Amino acid sequence: MALRVLGVSQNMRTFVRGVDMIKRYKSAATLQKTLLNIPATQVTKLDNGLRVASEDSGASTATVGLWIDAGSRSETEKNNGVAHFLEHMAFKGTAKRSQTDLELEVENLGAHLNAYTSREQTVFYAKCLSKDVPKAVEILSDIIQNSKLGESEIARERSVILREMQEVESNLQEVVFDHLHATAYQGTPLGQTILGPTKNIQSIGKSDLTDYIQTHYKASRIVLAAAGGVKHNDLVKLANSSLGGLEASVLPPEVTPCRFTGSEVRVRDDSLPLAHVAIAVEGCGWTDQDNIPLMVANTLVGAWDRSQGGGANNASNLARASAEDNLCHSFQSFNTCYRDTGLWGIYFVCDPLQCEDMLFNVQSEWMRLCTMVTEAEVERAKNLLKTNMLLQLDGTTPICEDIGRQILCYNRRIPLHELEQRIDAVSVGNVRDVAMKYIYDRCPAVAAVGPVENLPDYNRIRSSMYWLRV
């Protein structure tokens, strides 16, 4: 700007622009070089089918874990909740370690042992010093192969899980997403909650837990993943000695197709101060070619919270409208993927009187995605998606999680530079095409909890999923 005010010659302006372009190319080249120089993920398959995957960054700490291709989707209506119950039982002692011995051993290492269950995966992992990786692998292997599953421990954990269910019920976001899955995938395993119904928790016994382990904890469905200060060849040797005895599955796991049903569930409770609403259409699975364009579209809609400010300066149209017109307290778009299906939508929290206006703005933004999204918006969303992708891989635990999940989902870990290229390849046309394919004139699933009297009825919501224009 100062150069223009001083009225410098056209040649000088050209020179300045050239320097800017050189800087830009240098920074782009540096990013590309950085992405290419990230340590490669090495993968080895053992004789029994178990996969070992690791990324050695030479750090002084490491995260190592077992990613198992089984979650609440692998359950039936009768044993729903058993995968999560098993996760709770994992740290209650094994054939050679009592619960006290296990806890003392982990404490003395200064390590952290944790686990979680999702709809398609169960994970057990440990964070420790890199020199303690052999011990961590041995402990994790002992946990999934030799848990005692004593009757007294089962009874104690039953009450713990029932208390956890009460805590989850106070988290309205969790409640809304459970309702969303229940209505979107009604009558299928994906419609079940991860924790399971109370009646199941009260009746699950040792035989149910043992049957689940024998059915699903097969070597071919397990990935030993590690990140940080780990040597891959040493990890393979550890896996062979600790997990080489796991039974290999002869047949691949059967995946029950989970059909999507456009429908709604409303839990009206006028005693709550705010309405919590989620609306979603059926997205695609992990391996579908439409996944990256849908991720860009999801990033374009964005997320916003009243506490973060921004107002009229927000890049997201919906965030700008929410701030200027006081439409909601917060919203976040989501793209939840499973093996063969997914949920693409938005969750928002608003005052009771704003339900209709907020939903109108959400659906208007969706229709704009389908018809007239601009190139500048798509470029911004792509840059933001790449930034978020890199920020989420900060630390050994997120990297280890990324490795384990991707090996289960894709049977390989997609290198960051390849992922960046795939995002860069998304065009405005791609975004419009996937929006027309998945959003336009599709029946959505709706879940709402709280004072939702002003939320339009389902027929009105459905009729706003397309535009009629002359």
Image: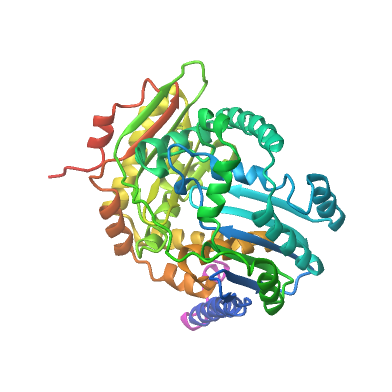
Question: In the orientation shown, which residue stands out farthest toward the front?
Answer: 207
- Residue 395, can we see it? no
In this view, the residue in front, 209 or 113, is 209
- Rendering quarter of residue 327: top left
In the rendered structure, the answer to whether residue 293 lies left or right of residue 461 reads: right
In the rendered structure, the answer to whether residue 467 lies left or right of residue 226 reads: left
Q: Is residue 200 magenta?
A: no
Query: Looking at the picture, does residue 343 appear above or below residue 200?
Result: below
Q: Is residue 11 magenta?
A: yes
Question: In the orientation shown, which residue stands out farthest toward the top?
Answer: 271
Expressed as whole percent of the image width and height from the top left, the position of residue 13 reads: 50, 78
In this view, the residue in front, 385 or 83, is 83
Question: In the orientation shown, which residue stands out farthest toward the right?
Answer: 108
In the rendered structure, the answer to whether residue 310 lies left or right of residue 447 reads: right
In this view, the residue in front, 426 or 173, is 173
- Rendering quarter of residue 345: top left
Residue located 51% across and 57% down the image: 69
- Residue 120, can we see it? yes
Residue located 56% across and 75% down the image: 47
Expressed as whole percent of the image width and height from the top left, the position of residue 11 reads: 48, 83
In this view, the residue in front, 285 or 330, is 285
Q: Which segment did they paint magenta?
A: 1-12
Residue located 46% across and 36% down the image: 178
Expressed as whole percent of the image width and height from the top left, the position of residue 102 reads: 79, 51
Query: Looking at the picture, does residue 235 appear above or below residue 110?
Result: below
Q: In the rendered view of the protein, which quadrant contains the C terminus?
A: top left
Q: In the rendered view of the protein, which quadrant contains the N terminus?
A: bottom right
Expressed as whole percent of the image width and height from the top left, the position of residue 51 reads: 57, 70
State the colouring used for the structure image. Answer: rainbow
